[in-house]
Image: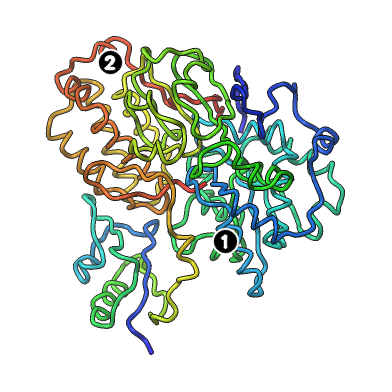
Amino acid sequence: MTSTATVLTVAAWPDCAPRLLRPSQAGPEDHADYVQGGGYRPLTDADALLEQIDLSGLLGRGGAAFPLGTKLRTVRDAGRRGMQTVVVANGEEGEPASVKDRWLLRNRPHLVLDGLRLAVAMVNASHAYVYVSDEQSAAAVSGALSQLDAAAFGATDVAVLAVEPGYVAGEETAAVRRINGGPAKPTDKPPRPFEEGVSGLPTMVSNVETLANVPYIHEHGSQSYRAVGTPMSPGTFLATITGGGRPAALYEIPHGAAFSDLLVLHGLTTESVRGVLMGGYFAGLVNTDILDATLDHETIRRLGSGLGCGAISILTDDCPVAVAAAVLSYFDRENAGQCGSCFNGTAAMAAVASALRDGAATQDDLTRLERWSVVLRGRGACGTIDGATNVAASLLHQFPHLVSRHLANDCPSCRTDTFTAVRPYEVEAVAQP
Amino acid sequence: MSDGLRIRLDRTLCDGFGICAKHAPDYFSLDDWGYASLIGDGTVPEKDRDAVMRALLDCPVHAIIYMGEHRPSSDGAAHHDMTESPEPEPKTDDNDAISGFVR
């Protein structure tokens, strides 16, 4: 994949020391810098570290917020029953509105590799993979690997696999399927990778940002890790902020920070905000209720949405109906084309949302959209159809008055300057071969 | 001793023939386009074995997969934690929780 570089603001949160970003440092971190900063600390007791990971409450940063400790323990225990195990560092950031994984891989490859090294030790893995679709990321990680001495990963084989990008290519079963020699498309569950993954072995697939948190816990312990964040959403997270007529930004935010403070940091006023698209394209739209929210899993869940991968697109001038239509159309194009409910459902919902945007939808269309947004949930091998139903349902429930106005073809912005982005709020344009 | 059987449905294989829902409507639901999803967790008690096996054997694309006999003692309790989704679960007024897009 060739990505077109764009201006990206990278900043830490005020009064919160960054753990993942290096805002004051220019350029990628090399091996000497990383070691000088305390990296690649010797690991003497892998079980003790796993206990600290459990106590830290570290949640996965790929979108599902699954506790890393549980994942590690399950794969480790399978290994102790006599099976070989595998770890996959997943940096295939298929989400167009997110850039945090690519930033980490390009700028702090050793931090990710250190986390991978520790995960490998905790589950006693025989093989490890760094799975990416970005050429710069692949080059940075390969370069970083070449700087390590042979002892860093012990007897474990480590390979970098670069694949063609795609929305579904980063889903965990798609990663496993691709590593196994198949297409980078999801498989139905069960089995999940922890049961049967790479080469049929118990496999821990973990997002690279999740792994990048592990060295901090190794060095400072779980209590220090929990010093920022909330009890249910400990630590910091990388947030890709797009929209609002501002250049894209990558911030490291302590969980529980106020959304209104994020707006200040990003140079926007509360009055200008109509809503947000949460979790990249996955977790749907939220109306101005977001203005009083804090950025943690429990609060965003109460709003009927999710933090997901930490990508937040801020809607100021853009019409939420048009944004929903654009995202649904993206799902219509970018789904894996495997599950009937998904390739039919995304097409149908995109058609209604687009008609609504164009002032051509009927009440019957809306009734169908409402029904699909409920009954199609969970009907795919991966979460793509769920992302689409989230967008449709949240549009109808969060913006009912706006939907009514579009039924009457009464949206000035959609009639004059229609939002029709092919990849809404993408951070980097992708040149497809 | 068997207490029924276990199956799974591979929705990437389903071609929407809908035969499964005719034979075993309590186990297979069809969407507006005729594509199937499994109702429940794939555990089939003995009393429903014949209907579900007929659905399995009649599926033209072999999307229904026999996973073995069901023995209550072999339930996957050890895996319970791994199948729960603590992911933020967007809800609307009238829908169930969903799972996340697991990256």
Tell me how far mark 2 sits from mark 1, CA to CA: 46 Å
Q: Are marks 2 and 1 on the same chain?
A: yes
- Residue at 44% x, 30% y: name it: A294
Front residue (pair B54, A88): A88
Above or below A253: residue A132: below
The image shows residue A199 at horizontal and vertical percentages of 62, 64
- Residue at 26% x, 32% y: name it: A351
- Residue at 34% x, 45% y: name it: A343
Above or below B84: residue A90: above
Q: Quadrant of the N terminus of chain A?
A: top right
The image shows residue A171 at horizontal and vertical percentages of 50, 47
Circles 2 and 1: CB atoms closer than 8 Å = no
Q: Residue furthest left?
A: A363
The image shows residue A168 at horizontal and vertical percentages of 48, 44
Which chain does tag 2 point to?
A
- Residue at 60% x, 22% y: name it: A14
N-terminal of the pair, mark 2 or mark 1, is 1
Locate residue A241 relative to residue A400 in the image: left or right: right
Instruction: Residue under label 2, please give it.
Output: A414
Amino acid marked by disc 2: Cys
- Crowding near pointer 1: few (<14 within 10 Å), some, many (20+)? many
Instruction: Residue under label 1, please give it.
Output: A197
Residue A369, quarter of picture: top left
Amino acid marked by disc 1: Gly
Q: Which mark is residue A242?
A: none
Front residue (pair B89, A201): B89
